[in-house]
Image (cartoon, coloured by chain):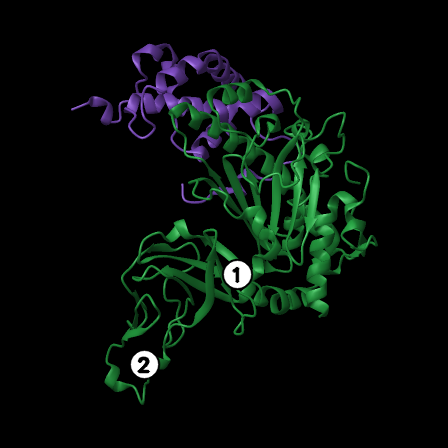
C-alpha cells in the first residue's frame, strides 16, 4: 500500500496474481528475451565522459547480443558503435571487453587490415592478391548509437523504430537536467550465477531493506511511522519505471557518519534529512522524508539519483543463470580534502551494503532452478518487479 | 628536493603521535578493505579509537591544501582518515572485520580499474 492507503499495483492497472518462475529459469524464455527484448531495445553502455577525446574508445562484450562492440569517438567528435569484428576473417579487432584507449585507427592484429574511426576500411596489406574486393562494402558493421543526457545507447536492431529520445519518453523529466558531470568515485563488478532479473528485481524495491539490511542501513529507511520502508511514490511507464524511497528523518547517525556529515556539505544516501534539493526531477512528488529516487531504464539499467551523487547499476544477461553485475558511483567533486572523507564514508557504506544485497541472489537462483516452486508473489511494494515482469512478458508473447 | 617525494612515510609533525598507524595509510579502497579484513578486531579497535578523536583536527589541517595539491605527508594523513572510514563498519556495526553472516564473498566483488 501507498502511505496514503492506495495500492500502486491497482492504480497502474497491473495484475495482482502470482507470477511464474519460468522467466527466471527457462532457457527458451531467455532466448526469447535475447531476440525480442535485448535485440530490440536501446541499451545503455556507458557515458560520454568515458570517451571524451577524438580517438578514445572502449570495448564492451555483450553476450546477450552475442557480440562484442567498439564504442569510439571519431575525429569529427561523433560517437559511433561497431561490432568488434574485422571484415576480413572476423577476428576481434580491438581486444575484448574492458579494453579501452586512444587510437587514430583500428588495425587487426591477424593480417593487418586497418580501419578509420568512422569504420571505413582504409588499408589492406597485399590488396592485389584478393579477387574483386570492393573496399567500400567492407566497412566495420555499425550498431545504431546515440547519446541522451550523456548516457551512450546502442541498438542492435537493423530497423530501429524509435529514437533514444522517444525511447526514454515519459522518463525524461525525471532525469533530464541532472548534473551527470560528477566524476566516477567507485566502480565495482561481479559475475553472478543467477538470472539477470533476479539482480534487477533486487534493486527496484525497498521491501527487503528492513530484513536484509537490518544491521546496516535499515534504520535510515524505516521507522515507527513507516515500519516496512514503504515507498513514498511510484511511476510505471510504457517500459521504464521509477520509485522513490522514504528516508527516516530521525535516523541516529553512527560516529563515523556524524563525523562525515560534519565534515561535508555533501549528502549521504543514508541520511535523508539533509537531502534538500532544487533539481526538478528529484523527489518528483515532493514527498516529505524523501531519501532518493530509483529509476529503471528498460531493460537492464537502474539509476539512483540523489543530491550530489548518482549511481548506475547494470544487470547484463550472460546466460539464463549468469549475469554480470556492474555498479558505478559518481559523486560531486570534493571542494576540499575533508569533503572527500565524507565521500569515503559513502563508498565504504555502499560497498558493505551491496555485499548484503548480493548475498541472496545466487541462493534464490539455486532454489528456483530446482523447479519445485512454480510461482512467486509480489507485494504492492514490489510493484516495480511486477511491472518489469509484465513488460518483458508482453514483448515475449507479442 | 622535498624528501617526502621519495616514498617517505612520515605524517605531518602535528600528527606524529599517529605514526604507529601509518601502515593503515593505503591509497586505494581495495587495499584499505583488505587491510581491514586481514586485521584482528583489537588492531582495528585500537586504530579506530586513536583516529576518532583526531578526525576533526585532521580535517582542519588537510583543508589548508587544495584537493589535488597536497604534499605527500598530508596525503598519508588523508589516507588514514579514509582507512578510518573503511574500518568504521567493523567497529560500529559488525563487531568483526567482515560483513558478517549474510554477505557475499568480497573477493568476488572487485574494484574495476584500481
Query: Residue at (45%, 33%) from the top-left corner?
Result: B29
Q: Quadrant of residue A136?
A: bottom left
The mark that comes first in sequence, 2 or 1, is: 2
Vertically, is A125 above or below B30? below
Dot 2 corresponds to which residue?
A: A135
Vertically, is A155 above or below A211? below
Chain B in the picture: what colour?
purple
Q: Secondary structure at mark 2?
A: helix
Residue B40 at least partly seen: no
Work out which quarter of the rendered image holds the N terminus of chain A and state it.
top right
Q: Name the outermost residue toward the right.
A: A17
Q: What percent of the width, then of the height, locates residue B86?
A: 49, 27
Q: What percent of the width, then of the height, locates residue A22?
A: 75, 60
Q: What percent of the width, then of the height, locates residue A126?
A: 23, 80
- The subunit letter for the residue under badge 1 reads A
Q: Secondary structure at mark 1?
A: helix
Q: How many marks?
A: 2
Dot 1 corresponds to which residue?
A: A164
Work out which quarter of the rendered image holds the C terminus of chain A and state it.
bottom right
Figure chain in green: A
Amino acid at each position: 500500500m501507498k502511505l496514503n492507503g492506495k495500492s500502486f499495483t491497482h492504480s497502474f492497472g497491473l495484475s495482482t496474481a502470482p507470477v511464474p518462475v519460468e522467466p527466471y529459469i527457462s532457457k527458451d524464455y531467455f532466448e526469447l528475451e535475447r531476440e525480442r527484448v535485448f535485440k530490440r531495445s536501446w541499451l545503455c553502455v556507458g557515458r560520454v565522459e568515458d570517451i571524451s577525446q577524438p580517438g578514445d574508445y572502449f570495448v564492451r562484450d555483450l553476450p546477450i547480443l552475442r557480440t562484442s562492440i567498439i564504442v569510439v569517438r571519431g575525429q569529427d567528435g561523433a560517437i559511433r558503435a561497431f561490432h568488434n569484428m574485422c571484415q576480413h576473417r572476423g577476428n576481434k579487432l580491438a581486444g575484448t571487453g574492458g579494453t579501452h584507449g586512444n587510437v587514430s585507427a583500428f588495425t587487426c592484429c591477424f593480417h593487418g587490415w586497418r580501419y578509420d574511426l568512422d569504420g571505413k576500411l582504409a588499408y589492406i596489406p597485399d590488396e592485389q592478391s584478393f579477387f574483386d574486393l570492393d573496399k567500400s562494402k567492407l566497412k566495420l558493421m555499425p550498431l545504431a548509437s546515440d547519446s541522451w543526457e550523456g548516457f551512450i545507447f546502442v541498438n542492435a536492431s537493423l530497423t530501429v523504430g524509435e529514437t533514444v529520445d522517444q525511447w526514454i519518453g515519459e522518463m525524461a523529466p525525471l532525469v533530464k537536467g541532472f548534473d551527470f558531470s560528477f566524476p566516477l568515485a567507485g566502480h565495482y563488478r561481479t559475475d553472478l550465477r543467477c538470472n539477470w532479473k533476479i539482480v534487477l528485481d533486487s534493486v527496484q524495491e525497498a521491501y527487503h531493506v528492513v530484513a536484509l539490511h537490518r544491521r546496516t542501513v535499515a534504520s535510515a529507511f524505516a521507522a515507527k511511522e513507516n515500519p516496512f520502508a514503504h515507498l513514498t511514490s511510484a511511476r510505471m511507464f510504457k517500459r521504464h519505471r521509477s520509485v522513490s524511497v522514504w528516508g527516516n528523518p530521525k535516523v541516529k547517525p553512527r560516529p563515523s557518519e556524524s563525523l562525515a556529515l560534519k565534515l561535508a556539505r555533501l549528502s549521504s544516501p543514508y541520511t535523508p534529512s539533509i537531502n534538500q534539493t532544487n533539481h526538478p526531477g528529484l523527489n518528483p512528488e515532493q514527498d516529505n522524508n524523501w531519501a532518493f529516487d530509483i529509476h529503471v531504464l528498460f531493460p537492464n539499467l537502474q539509476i539512483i539519483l540523489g543530491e550530489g551523487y548518482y549511481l548506475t547499476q547494470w544487470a547484463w544477461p550472460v546466460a539464463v543463470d549468469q549475469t554480470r553485475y556492474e555498479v558505478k558511483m559518481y559523486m560531486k567533486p570534493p571542494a576540499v580534502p575533508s569533503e572527500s572523507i565524507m565521500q569515503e564514508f559513502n563508498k565504504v557504506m555502499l560497498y558493505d551494503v551491496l555485499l548484503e544485497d548480493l548475498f541472496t541472489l545466487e541462493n534464490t537462483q539455486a532454489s528456483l532452478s530446482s523447479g519445485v516452486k512454480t510461482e512467486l508473489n509480489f507485494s504492492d511494494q514490489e510493484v516495480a518487479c511486477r511491472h518489469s515482469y509484465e513488460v518483458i512478458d508482453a514483448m515475449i508473447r507479442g | 628536493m622535498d624528501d617526502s617525494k621519495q616514498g617517505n612515510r612520515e605524517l605531518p609533525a602535528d600528527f606524529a603521535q599517529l605514526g604507529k598507524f601509518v601502515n593503515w595509510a593505503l591509497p586505494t579502497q581495495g587495499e584499505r578493505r583488505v587491510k581491514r579484513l586481514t586485521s584482528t578486531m583489537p588492531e582495528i579497535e585500537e586504530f579506530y579509537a586513536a583516529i576518532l578523536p583526531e578526525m576533526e583536527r585532521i580535517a582542519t589541517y588537510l583543508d589548508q591544501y587544495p584537493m589535488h595539491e597536497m604534499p605527500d605527508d598530508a596525503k598519508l594523513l588523508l589516507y588514514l582518515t579514509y582507512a578510518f572510514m573503511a574500518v568504521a563498519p567493523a567497529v560500529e556495526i559488525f563487531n568483526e572485520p567482515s560483513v558478517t553472516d549474510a554477505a557475499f564473498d568480497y573477493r568476488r566483488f572487485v574494484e574495476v580499474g584500481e
